[in-house]
Amino acid sequence: MQFKRYGLRAASLLAALLLVVHAAWAAEPFKIRDIQVEGLQRIEPGTIFASMPLRVGDTYNDEKGTASIRSLFALGLFTDVRLEINGDVLVVVVEERPSVAGVEFIGTREFDKDVLAKALRGIGLAEGRPFDKALLDRAEQELKRQYINKSLYAAEVVTTVTPVERNRVNLAFTVSEGEPATISEIRIVGNKAFSESTLRNLFDLDTGNWMSWYTKSNRYSRAKLNADIETLRSYYLTRGYLEFQVESTQVAIAPNKQDMSITLNVIEGERFVVAGVRLAGNYLGREDEFKALVSIQPGEAYNADRVAETVKAFTEHFGRFGYAFARVQSVPDIDRSTNRVALELRAEPSRRAYVRRINVTGNSRTRDEVIRREFRQYESAWYDSDKIQLSRSRVDRLGYFSEVAVETSEVPGIPDQVDLTLKVTERPTGSVTLGAGFSSSEGLGLQFGVSQQNAFGSGNSLGFQVNTSDVNRLILLNTTDPYFTQDGVSRTIDLYQRTSRPYVETASYALETLGASLRFGIPLTERDTIYLGGGIERTTIVPGTYLPVAYQTYADQFGYSSTAFPLTLGWGRDGRDSALVPTSGTLQRASAEWSTAGEVRYLRATYQYQHYVPLTKQYTFAFNTDLGLGKAIGGRPYPLFKNFYGGGLGSVRGFEAGSLGPRDATTNLSYGGPKKINFNFELQAPFPGAGNDRTLRLYTFIDTGNVYGADESIDPSDFRVGGGIGLSWVSPMGPLRLAVARPLRKFDGDRIQFLQFQIGTTF
């Protein structure tokens, strides 16, 4: 009790003392005649005045003074702030924080320095910003986090702060990166239905092999692990294991910070079979249409992918009728006694909606009309999910934007209307290219090009290209207006000079073509386009070694130079999932060239068909057909310089490029023919050690085909056949194809080539 009374007296004494001190420090209120600022070096006085709640003419009191000091400290620009009173003048005395003069990174090999500088800007540490010692710890932690994301757990960061003139500091981050931590073990515990090795093969992460220097698949990444876990979950859920779950994930790193182990504990649950599918809810009286969209089959194992596909198809089908807010749920009714599951698809279409307005944002350079003309969803029309998705895809295919997204928002107060906002992120569309390539058939080739796909934001393209090799040379100037008419008819103008030398020797004969063409592209459907055009070409036979007798005879009869006025007709459809690394889909191209005027008369047609079939996640079967046919018209012979050639990559591998077909009687060298037929079969597989990386693949192949003269009939018994293995790599210089082949059917006089490669070609 006495202790409590003593504490009470001490508290009273302290309170009284504080009141006396406060009375001594308190300032009498006064009207501010002027406000002065002292101590500024880089910061403008306006920043001070704008942040303070006091103005000239206001009445000063201690409460407002305290609020002013608090607001100035909140700017984060000062290490000290105090207020002094000189009569009726308020003096603000500040001490500025030093600013960051420069940021330097030493010892960084794994990262580009710009990447690290951007990471530090994200936490507020950058050149020109105020320096705060508290940020240094955060900066070091952020740098370590960046290295941990690269599996460099042993990375150490030492910071040096060097003061410089004008109250600034230089920051130097010295990094000792160390060696990356690698995965030494991946364990999956609790699996019974599938072996551990089968499940581990699904992962992109692994324990390393001789290709790990390229794939880096043995470096731990949380994002990659999460992706592998989702792959594992999908594997089970698509095979009937409805209740599968990953119970826990343990990632352990050894004390040396070099070895890591990953353990996944899974609960498989029972395998369920679909007993039936029932529709519930409001289906707009179109139950039969929705039933046709169901991809879930009773009697088969439960497949989460098919359930998701069905729900998505239902939602999109509602969207076709304007129901932008339709909700579809899959509700499973599980019978664990029989391991069967009945699915109920509940639908609530909500309300039908119109599109009130379509907004476009993010296009600072590209004109609005260039984007809007790709839209198939219109304002004041019913909301249509198909047209919206098609519109987004068409804008994305322009190639002017790195990101394209469509957002749907309700119109406040109007429940049956929505606004669409198309958000785009522009990317550079102009480029200057300079490159080099080498192939076994064409030798060294140099490339130079200047192109602008979106000239002045108009959507028109301009281009100039120079390609040269020991065999083929090209100079091309072209321009394309994709909307020459409002209906989407494109117009392309080409001016070109091409030199083709059938043999690498520089003294061999050559074909020189100078021409110009005008083409129009007419869209038939969203996927099909036909091309109509015409042009003028002048082709010259340049004498040299290996000039076939047939060419000499043609030149003696019709001259070394010939002029043609070809009319062109083409059609194209590309349904592949990727242009560089396709795994599914079909590509078709057809073209016809008809010269009815000039000194050369002919008809020339080509057709190409490619089809890709995904056998598994890692294996793809590919098939290619390439046909060509030329025919003389007007009583004149078919021009030899329009012949087709066969052999080599893109044709029958194992035979020298351009060596198939009719041969010259003197040199026994092929000069091509007006008939060509090729068939290519490939089985594409992962490169050993590269895991699921599709940019580096092995393939085995069988090719067959031949080239025939005008008077020869196509006879399969004359087909050359080649087979072998190859490597495809999407390299920084372009797609590279290498093939090691041997003839499986050859004839006397055939020119064999076992190793063939080229950069810049596919299939």
Image: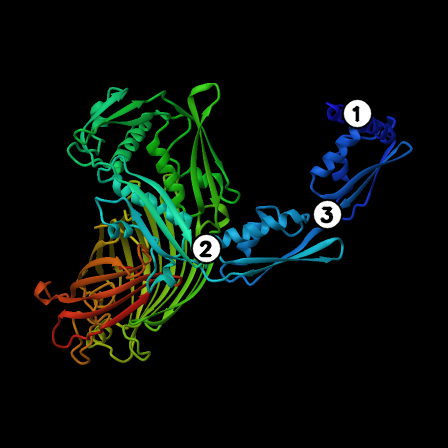
Query: Please, what is the three-letter code of the amino acid marked with disc 1?
Result: Arg
> Where's residue 582, x and y in %?
29, 52
CA neighbours of label 3 inside 10 A, class few (<14), some (14 to 19), many (20+): some
Residue at which label 3 appears: 97
Precedes in sequence: disc 1 or disc 2: 1
Query: Please, what is the three-letter code of the amino acid marked with disc 3?
Result: Arg
Q: Which mark is residue 9?
A: 1
Residue at which label 2 appears: 150
What's the distance in space between the residues labelled 1 and 3, CA to CA?
44 Å
> Where's residue 130, x and y in %?
68, 47
Could you say which is closer to the camera, residue 713 or residue 15? 15
Residues tagged 2 and 3 counted as in contact (Cβ below 8 A)? no
Precedes in sequence: disc 1 or disc 3: 1
Quadrant location, the C terminus: bottom left
Could you say which is closer to the camera, residue 534 or residue 355? 355
**Res 422 visible:** yes
> Where's residue 631, x and y in %?
18, 61
Q: Is residue 129 left or right of residue 737?
A: right
